[in-house]
């Protein structure tokens, strides 16, 4: 991943935690029911997730108590706006936006010398079966301070009120209690430590529970899409639920999403885009067995691209150039069918979220589309970074360079 890091494409927006902040972070871990980290320095994202701690604990989602209960840790106001690098739910980043929108000033005040443990409570203690994800609706975002700082403020204020009464100002024992409280927690009198719960209402979403499930429920019918085939098989045996269920590999899924106005395609328009050009180059690169030039050069140099395109067998060449071949034939004969000319995965990869969808739904559907057919490394990087990193690691070194340059160029 070194080349990605040098290009600022690998977890480049994490912030470093060290010193006293590590102690506060550990207090949050313990308060949430987890064990402390032994690391003296690590990095975190917008929800307080750390790749180093995940590696230490050998548990990617170490901030979860089971799949139904996720949490976050806030130890600095600088977490505002940071990416969520390993979201368990597709709306994790949106929930954090709500947290800062409502409590930014209080978070700034509290994290001067404390930390905030966040509980995402959806009133489900544990998932038992795949269709339990349908129970997700309102998530109550609850806040807990380490050392129960809010309770300590109440106790400190109570001591002060007692101090003011009668001759209590001469009570040495009371003096000592006040001094001890002030030394340990500081002067809490004017500190605003109240963080009211926030109700976050979900609509369509993706969850990593049960191996990955898309819940699409803002359309004509509720549609569940499963990434894990075993989970799909378990779900379809449920005789109570009558909604539509698919595995992500089912070809009929794309047709259903199209008929429900969730996705759309326009091959004639798409063939002139940068996306199509990237996908075509990616397909050619995956088709080449023996090369005498670096893959990066082959994909960037039009002369070399044509040279190697003509070196592959005719059947593979037709597959790489399927869209252009279809459009040429369709211009002459309108009876020609896409499936007879264009490779299925190539066709699927050229779909887009329907233009009528809301922005948050478009992001969700893009993620689903790159899971259905991941032939565009840029969109895979944008919408499923974990899968992107896996695929990137398996690439030829020269291909890695092409991917980095392609993404960096698009990001400006």
Image (cartoon, grey):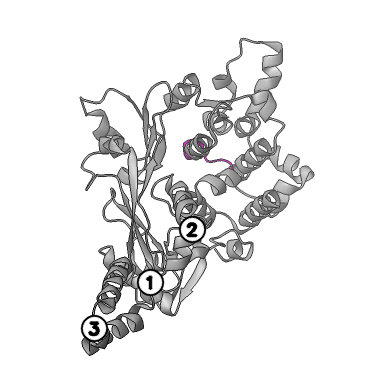
Q: Residue at x 42, y 69 (%)?
A: 190
Q: Badges 2 and 3: C-beta atoms under 8 Å apart?
A: no
Q: CA distance from mark 3 to mark 1?
A: 22 Å
In the image, residue 80 lies at what x, y percent?
A: 51, 58
Is 344 positioned to the left or the right of 292 in the image? Answer: left
Which comes sooner in the sequence, label 2 or label 3?
2
Is 110 positioned to the left or the right of 326 in the image? Answer: left
Residue 346, located in which quarter of the rendered image? top right
Camera-side residue of 34 and 128:
34
Local SS, label 2: helix
Badge 2 is on which residue? 104
Whether residue 45 can be seen here? no
Please provide the residue range marked out in magenta: 369-376
Camera-side mark, 3 or 1: 3
Residue 73, compared with residue 97, is above or below; it is: below
Q: Kindly identify which numbered label has been placed on residue 167.
A: 3
Residue 31, compared with residue 322, is above or below; it is: below
Residue 333, compared with residue 400, is above or below; it is: above
Badge 1 is on which residue? 189
Q: Badges 2 and 1: C-beta atoms under 8 Å apart?
A: no
Camera-side mark, 2 or 3: 3
């Amino acid at each position: 991943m070194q080349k990605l890091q040098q290009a600022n494409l690998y977890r480049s927006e994490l912030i470093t935690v060290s010193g006293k902040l590590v102690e506060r972070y550990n207090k949050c871990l313990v308060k949430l029911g987890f064990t402390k980290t032994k690391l003296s320095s690590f990095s975190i994202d917008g929800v307080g997730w750390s790749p180093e701690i995940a590696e230490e604990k050998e548990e990617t989602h170490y901030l979860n108590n089971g799949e139904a209960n996720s949490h976050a840790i806030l130890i600095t106001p600088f977490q505002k706006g940071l990416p969520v690098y390993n979201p368990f739910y597709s709306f994790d980043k949106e929930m954090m936006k709500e947290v800062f929108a409502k409590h930014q000033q209080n978070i700034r005040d509290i994290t001067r010398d404390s930390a905030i443990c966040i509980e995402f409570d959806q009133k489900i203690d544990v998932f038992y079966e795949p269709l339990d994800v349908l129970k997700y609706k309102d998530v109550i975002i609850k806040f807990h301070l380490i050392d129960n700082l809010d309770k300590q403020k109440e106790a400190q204020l109570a001591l002060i009120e007692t101090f003011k009464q009668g001759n209590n100002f001469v009570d040495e024992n009371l003096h000592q209690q006040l001094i001890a409280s002030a030394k340990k927690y500081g002067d809490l009198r004017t500190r605003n430590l109240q963080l009211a719960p926030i109700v976050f209402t979900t609509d369509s979403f993706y969850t990593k529970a049960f191996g990955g499930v898309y819940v699409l429920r803002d359309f004509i019918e509720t549609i569940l899409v499963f990434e894990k085939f075993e989970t799909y098989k378990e779900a379809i045996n449920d005789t109570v639920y009558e909604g539509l269920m698919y595995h992500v590999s089912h070809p009929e899924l794309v047709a259903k999403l199209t008929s429900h106005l969730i996705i759309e395609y326009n091959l004639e328009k798409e063939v002139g885009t940068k996306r199509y050009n990237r996908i075509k180059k990616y397909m050619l690169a995956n088709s080449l067995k023996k090369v005498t030039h670096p893959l990066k050069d082959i994909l960037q140099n039009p002369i070399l691209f044509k040279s190697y395109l003509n070196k592959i067998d005719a059947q593979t060449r037709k597959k790489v150039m399927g869209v252009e071949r279809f459009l040429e034939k369709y211009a002459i004969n309108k009876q020609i069918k896409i499936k007879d000319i264009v490779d299925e995965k190539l066709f699927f990869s050229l779909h887009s979220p329907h233009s009528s969808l809301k922005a948050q739904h478009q992001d969700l559907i893009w993620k689903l589309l790159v899971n259905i057919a991941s032939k565009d490394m840029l969109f895979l990087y944008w919408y499923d970074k974990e899968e992107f990193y896996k695929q990137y690691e398996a690439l030829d070194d020269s291909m890695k360079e092409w991917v980095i340059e392609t993404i960096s160029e698009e990001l400006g």
